[in-house]
Amino acid sequence: MKRKVGYTWRLRELMAQHRIFTATELVPLLRERGIDLSASQVHRMVSGTPERLSLQVLSALCDILACTPADLVATTAENAGVRKTGCVGESGERMSATPGIGSPSRGLGMSVRSSSTRQW
């Protein structure tokens, strides 16, 4: 069975607990620890969820906020459900897994649109 993993970036929450409310306040604290990031880079790290983060930056943040990496990154993992693509009705006809779509009288509920009428 496949597992679905994810994470929550909790930097802003931990900053608030330490009464650091703006990315600008974090810049000199990082610089004291040898991390030279611009205000806009720190703002993106605070306001968004980073896809990549160096261990040096992570270590500096942990030092500043007196926390562990697990405090900054809350992970989740769950079993990925099996995706149903269709089912069989009481009389044996194939039907869509979505109620109301794909009844035997309407086929599989699919429609074809000509390329000239597509709206992008």
Image: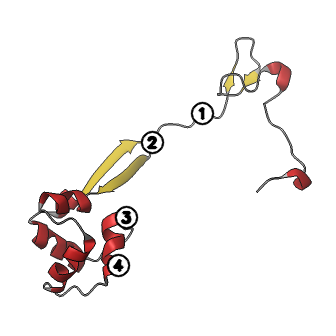
Q: Which quarter of the figure has residue 112?
A: top right
Say whether marks 1 and 4 touch (CB < 8 Å): no
Residue 27, numbered circle: none
Residue 34 location in percent, x, y? 17, 88
- Seen from the viewer's position, the closer of residues 31 and 39 is 39
Residue topped by disc 3? 48
Residue occupying the point 30% across, 67% down: 46
Would you name the residue on which mark 4 appears?
Answer: 41
Q: Amino acid at mark 4?
A: Gln
Colouring scheme applied when the structure was drawn: secondary structure
Q: Given this view, does label 4 or label 2 mark the residue nearer the observer?
A: 4
Q: Residue at x 38, y 51 (%)?
A: 5
Which residue is under mark 2?
A: 80
User: In the drawing, what numbered circle is on residue 84?
Assistant: 1
Q: What's the distance in space between the residues labelled 4 and 2, CA to CA?
A: 34 Å
Which residue type carries mark 2? Ala
Task: Return the x and y of residue 41 as percentages of the image width and height.
Answer: 35, 78
Q: Residue at x 91, y 55 (%)?
A: 116
